[in-house]
């Protein structure tokens, strides 16, 4: 194990990360198709000692996407027109109805007691869930073109992007930065929300090191990370998805390289899995977990989502039955000087926990997610290295020490 720790290569993980963040994969979105990224990851897992496989699956809910960049322009006759910057000053809402061609109208504060024929209705507060559905229904009945709702930017200066396919409300909806929105009341604006929802598919990529002990054949160690991201804005900002979660995939590929070339056979099989579809409801890990159920397997699952920033602790979310995995992580953390802390890790690990499997989600951190600020340059190579070391030591404890 210590020999392998000395062979961890930050150059290789950085090379993987840079490639996955490159423009040719268009932000690794399920809406645009992830086939190129999947093929590239599969090529990196083609090594002696690894048995490759793929698991295609259909994405059961329509994936939210942009046809083109939305528009928000002030065209009031009292001054020059001004176009606002997408993702910085406004952005689409992921439940918006489509408005492909821009429409002009007065922007007026929403008042359910009056008509809003031909107007853009300004909501007084952020709306979500049933509140957004009801406001959209009432505003549509009052003749409004669409809704403008206040929405702040994150600490990185951008509004986030989501792909999760949820039913559209009745009207087009734009999120607008509050300071911008406050200046639109009573002014004439032109806006479009060219969104679409379309069917898609995904593919999990798996590489396996067979185990040497038949007693553990049905209890593999699964080391996983999702490779999909939210995709570039067409003609706009890039979404490299570096910390969420290209860095996690780089860790898994480095683990596969090190363990497959170690010269030692694990007692239990080790499966290295790059999950697709996490950003649209963790559908790739759902498909994989259901496959394990059909096999009658009893796996131990470690999922990594966030290996781009290290603040002196590794965060862990464990299923109730994951004591062996947590013990191995504790051992690894003590060996490496990496303390563990409870974290709320809403990622692929939950698909396994929800089906009764022993599972743990691990995250070191990321500086930005679902944002143009989540770039290759924002990733700390030492955080990625720490993640490799932590999971390598944990995997050795779980898969090799029982020989």
Image (spheres, grey):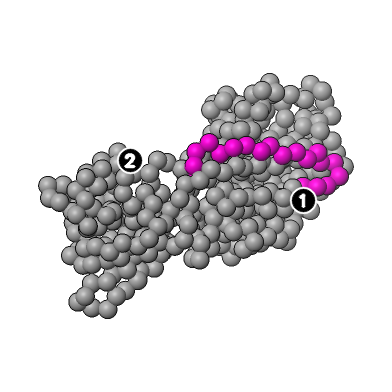
Indicate left or right for 169 with 3 as reference. Answer: left
User: Which element is circle 1 on?
Assistant: helix
Which quadrant does the C terminus fall into? top right
Position in image of residue 344 (x %, y %): 48, 40
What stretch of residues is rendered in magenta? 43-63
* Nearer to the camera, 382 or 295: 295
Task: Specify few, some or many for label 1: CA neighbours under 10 Å numbering under 14, 14-19, or 20 or more.
Answer: few
* Nearer to the camera, 293 or 35: 35
Q: Give how far apart the Cα atoms at labels 1 and 2 are.
A: 42 Å
* Residue located at (35% from left, 62% from top): 102
Asked if one can make out residue 361 in the rendered structure from this viewpoint, the answer is: no
Asked if one can make out residue 194 in the rendered structure from this viewpoint, the answer is: yes
* Residue position for label 2: 129
Position in image of residue 232 (x %, y %): 53, 59
Position in image of residue 4 (x %, y %): 79, 48
For residue 183, the mark is none
Task: Specify few, some or many for label 2: CA neighbours under 10 Å numbering under 14, 14-19, or 20 or more.
Answer: few
Position in image of residue 63 (x %, y %): 50, 45
* Residue position for label 1: 43
Q: Earlier in the sequence, mark 1 or mark 2?
A: 1
């Amino acid at each position: 194990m210590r020999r392998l720790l000395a062979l961890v290569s930050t150059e290789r993980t950085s090379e993987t990360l840079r490639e996955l963040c490159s423009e040719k994969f268009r932000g690794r979105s399920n809406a645009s198709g992830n086939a190129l990224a999947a093929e590239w990851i599969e090529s990196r897992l083609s090594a002696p000692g690894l048995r490759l496989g793929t698991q295609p699956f259909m994405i059961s809910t329509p994936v939210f996407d942009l046809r083109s960049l939305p528009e928000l322009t002030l065209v009031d006759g009292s001054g020059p027109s001004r176009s606002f910057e997408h993702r910085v000053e406004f952005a689409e809402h992921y439940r918006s109805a489509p408005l492909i061609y821009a429409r002009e109208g007065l922007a007026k504060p929403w008042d359910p007691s009056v008509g809003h024929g031909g107007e853009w209705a300004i909501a007084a507060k952020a709306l979500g869930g049933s509140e957004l559905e009801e406001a959209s229904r009432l505003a549509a009945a009052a003749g409004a073109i669409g809704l403008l709702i206040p929405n702040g930017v994150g600490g990185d200066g951008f509004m986030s992007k989501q792909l999760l396919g949820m039913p559209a409300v009745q009207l087009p909806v734009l999120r607008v930065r509050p300071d911008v929105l406050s200046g639109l009341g009573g002014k004439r604006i032109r806006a479009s929300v060219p969104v679409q929802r379309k069917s898609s598919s995904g593919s999990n990529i798996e590489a396996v090191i067979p185990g040497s002990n038949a007693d553990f054949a049905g209890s593999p160690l699964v080391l996983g990370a999702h490779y999909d991201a939210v995709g570039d804005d067409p003609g706009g900002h890039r979404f490299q998805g570096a910390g969420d979660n290209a860095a996690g995939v780089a860790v898994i590929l480095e683990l596969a390289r090190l363990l497959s070339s170690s010269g030692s056979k694990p007692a239990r099989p080790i499966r290295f899995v790059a999950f697709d579809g996490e950003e649209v409801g963790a559908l790739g890990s759902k498909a994989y977990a259901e496959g394990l159920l059909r096999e009658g397997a009893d796996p131990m699952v470690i999922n990594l989502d966030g290996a781009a920033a290290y603040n002196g602790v590794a965060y862990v979310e464990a299923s109730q039955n994951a004591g062996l995995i947590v013990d191995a992580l504790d051992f690894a953390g003590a060996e490496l000087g990496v303390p563990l802390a409870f974290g709320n890790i809403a990622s692929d690990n939950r698909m396994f926990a929800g089906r009764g499997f022993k599972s743990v989600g691990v995250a070191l951190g990321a500086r930005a997610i679902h944002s143009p600020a989540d770039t290759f340059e924002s990733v700390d190579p030492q955080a990625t290295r720490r993640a490799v070391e932590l999971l390598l030591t944990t995997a050795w404890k779980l898969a090799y020490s029982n020989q």
